[in-house]
Image (cartoon, helix red, strand yellow):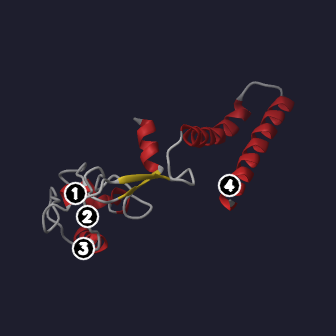
Amino acid sequence: MKAKDRFLDLSVFNIHNGSQTRFWEAKWLGNFTLKEQYLSLYNITRKKHISVANAFALTPLNISFKRSLVGEKLLKWNELVAKIAFVQLDDLQDSIKWSLTRQGSFTVQSMYKHLINQIAMPLNKLLWKFKLPFKIKIFIWFLIKRDNFNQRQLKKMERRR
């Protein structure tokens, strides 16, 4: 399930019919989920896993809350409704764009590289706690640092293509 969460964090949904995209928990309107942008509203929502299609099924939106919206929450709700007012659904299937490849297609290699890069930084910090001779710690630190530098250079070169 952790891999699924990471996958969703690195994906952006292109909305068409909205049936396969979660209203609150998927990135379909900008670089952040609506859950992240409107956490106070998400916390009091009755149906947290509702799809975009179900949310848009009724007018006003098919979203119910555990409490009445007053004050700041009402302002946030009005802001959210204004933000999604322009969205039009059609008959095509929703699609996913993978953010780690230029083509937008998921590859195991891109996910693996991402996960390895995430692990490299804590290893760098843990290194100094190992019971090893100091010169070996420095050598390992140098290798980690060089590898991270090389990967950053490769990413820059890929972006330039």
List the residue tagged with mark 4.
Answer: 158
Residues under numbered marks 2 and 3 in contact, where contact means CB atoms less than 8 Å apart = no
Say what secondary structure mark 3 lies in.
helix
Viewed as shown, does residue 27 lie left or right of 10?
left
The image quadrant that residue 53 belongs to is: bottom left
Residue 143 at what x, y percent from top left?
79, 37
Identity of the amino acid at label 3?
Answer: Asn
Give the Cα separation between the discs numbered 3 and 4. 41 Å
Marks 2 and 1, how far apart at CA: 8 Å
Question: What residue occupies the far right of the structure in this picture?
Answer: 135
Picture quarter with the N terminus: top left
Mark whose residue sits in front, 3 or 1: 1
Instruction: Count neighbours of disc 3 (C-alpha within 10 A) and say few if under 14, some if 14 to 19, many if 20 or more.
Output: few
Image depth: mark 2 or mark 3 in front: 2
Q: How far apart, in angstroms, are the residues tagged by discs 4 and 2? A: 34 Å
Question: What x and y, as percent, mark residue 141?
Answer: 78, 38
Q: Check disc 4 and give the amino acid type.
A: Glu
Residue 100 position (above or below residue 112): below
| First in sequence: mark 2 vs mark 1 | 1
How far apart are the two marked residues, 2 and 3, measured between alpha carbons? Answer: 20 Å
Which of marks 1 and 3 precedes in the sequence? 1
Mark 2: which amino acid? Leu
Are dots 4 and 2 in contact, CB under 8 Å?
no
State the count of labels. Answer: 4
As drawn, 9 above or below 77: above
Mark 2 or mark 3: name the one nearer the start of the chain. Answer: 3
Residue neighbourhood size for the residue with mark 2, other residues' Cα within 10 Å, grouped as few (<14), some (14–19), many (≥20): some
Whether 22 is drawn above or below 83: the answer is above
Residue denoted by label 3 = 78
Give the residue number, with chain letter if any, for mark 1: 53
Query: Do callouts 3 and 1 mark residues in contact (Cβ within 8 Å)?
Result: no
Identify the residue under disc 2.
89
